[in-house]
Amino acid sequence: MALLFRSISPSPLSLRSSSSSSRLSSLRPLNSSSFDPVKFEAERLRLDEQARSSMASASEADSLSEDKQWKWRIRKRVWDMMEKEGIARNPRPVHHRIPNFDGAASAAETLAQLEVFQKSSCVKVNPDSPQKQVRFLTLTGGKKLLTPQPRLRTGFFSVLEAPAVPAGAILEACTSVGAAKYGKPINLDEKIKVDLIVIGSVAVDPVTGARLGKGEGFAELEYGMLRYMGSIDDSTMVVTTVHDRQLVDGIPAEKLLIHDVPVDIICTPTRIIFTNTKIPKPQGIYWEKLSPEKLGQIRILRELKRRIERETGTKLPCGPSEKLPPTAQRRKR
């Protein structure tokens, strides 16, 4: 059940407002002695369980349109294959996740060989398990690490730098809890230039750079907000790390939606692939396909929408209402 975003305007709007900054401060995750890592992780796991249950229900729904069904068919084929062939690694099962895989650390080491990575000062990396080593190499390489809070429901982005992390805590800082604990929370007013984006994938086409995520659309949302902030542009390279078996020829690029983020470079445990993608990158956030129900789940996005409407005096479009799949309670272990 991917989020769809269609831009009201590709031109970024002014983000500088002291009153807006004070309101946005309430969205920042705690980053002090009051931070409770146990509570944070419990809430993250609860939301993860709910979200995966929702995705599972959505993928099995008979009412899915064809533009969604074909993506789910590819995702399920890849997830099933990874479990069957013993490629999958914890957290398991990999279904409805950015799947962790055997050789994820090697794929990260492959990425570290890239000139664009070596020259980058700030790298945005997704918070999923298979990219943990990428986050580690970013920090230990003396770079700024920009990472989102999972599903953007417990916060926005955190910036981490190795000197600000206590000795011996670098590995912890590469986890979601550690990023919230040791990172500097930022808001939409932050002036930050991102030199490289690392993104997780379920499947990626090595020829066209077409990519499929797990189906929630958060990678696209994060990309759109960074575009809005002026942190990235079309020239910012997008890289993914995957297992070689996640390479899928023939993902129909013509069926991708305007919000889908293509990749420029694919790093596997065995090789580097430059896709030379011709698929246009999203220009911002695409509002008229975003349902009120989805908007209601992400507070930073609601604040951004209110801000744009306040600054422009124009009401942004909203997508049609949708009936979200029921979410399950987290099972007792």
Image (cartoon, helix red, strand yellow):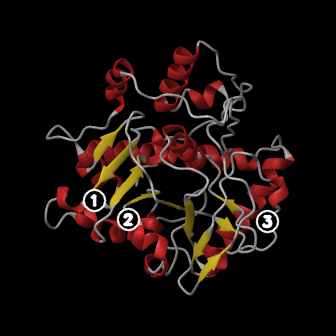
Disc 2 and disc 1 in contact, CB within 8 angstroms? yes
Residue closer to the observer: 141 or 291: 141
- Locate residue 265, reporting x and y percent: 60, 71
**Residue annotated with mark 1:** 173
Q: Earlier in the sequence, mark 2 or mark 1?
A: 2
Give the spatial CA distance, label 1 vs label 3.
35 Å
Give amino acid for label 3: Ile
Q: Residue at x 63, y 57 (%)?
A: 213
| Circle 2 Cα neighbour tier, 10 Å, few/some/many (<14 / 14–19 / ≥20) | many
Q: Is residue 148 visible?
A: yes
Residue most extreme to the bottom: 270
Secondary structure, mark 1, is helix
Asked if residue 49 is positioned above or below residue 190 in the image, the reply reads below
**Residue annotated with mark 2:** 135
Q: Earlier in the sequence, mark 1 or mark 3?
A: 1
Residue closer to the observer: 78 or 173: 173
Give amino acid for label 1: Ala
**Residue annotated with mark 3:** 251
Give amino acid for label 2: Arg
69 displayed left or right of 289: right
